[in-house]
Amino acid sequence: MNIIECTDEEILETAHTYWADLVKFSNEGEYGKFIRHFSYDLLIGLNEVEVGKQFAKSELTRSLDTNYDYLGLIRRGEHVTVLYRVRSTKKEGEWLGRLVLGYDKEGEVKIFGASIF
C-alpha cells in the first residue's frame, strides 16, 4: 500500500500522534524514545553521535511548545510530508516542523524524516 492513497484523516491520525511524541521526547531529552518510530532507512542514515550531541545541546529542541499548528499535507511518491507551525517556550519566533511518513517493508507507517526549520 502507498501512504499517499490514504485519506487525510487516516494520515493525520498517525501523524499527530507521532508529532506529539517527537515534541514530548525531544523536550524530555529521551533520544531512545524520540527515534522509536523512525524507519530503518532513516536510522541507518543517521550519524547517531552527531545527532545525539545536537539533541542534547539544542535549546530549541528542549523547549518545544506542545501547542503547535497543523499546516497541511504534501503527497509525493511513496511518502507524505506533514507540516506544522512550531514555537518554543524559551525562544521568540516560529519554526516550520516537517514530518515525512511512509510505509516500511513490513507495512507499518514509519517516520522517514523529521525536522524543524
Image: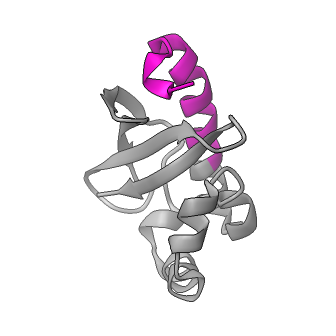
Instruction: Choose between 4 and 81: the one closer to the eye.
Output: 4
Magenta: main secondary structure = helix
- Residue 96 lies, with reference to residue 4, above or below; the image says below
Q: Is residue 91 left or right of residue 52?
A: left
Region of the chain picked out in magenta, as a range: 1-21
Q: Which residue shows up at 62% across the image and 55% down it?
A: 38
Tell me, what colour scheme is on the image? one colour
- Residue at (49%, 65%) from the top-left corner? 61
Point out the image quarter for the N terminus: top right
Q: Is residue 63 magenta?
A: no
Provide residue 79's location: percent of width, then percent of height. Answer: 42, 37
Q: Is residue 111 left or right of residue 96?
A: right
Q: Nearer the viewer, residue 94 or 106?
A: 106
In the displayed structure, 116 sits above or below 86; it is below
Q: Residue furthest left?
A: 93
The image position of residue 91, as x and y in percent, is: 34, 62
Q: Is 9 on the left-hand or right-hand side of 29?
A: left
> x and y percent of residue 110 in the render?
61, 44
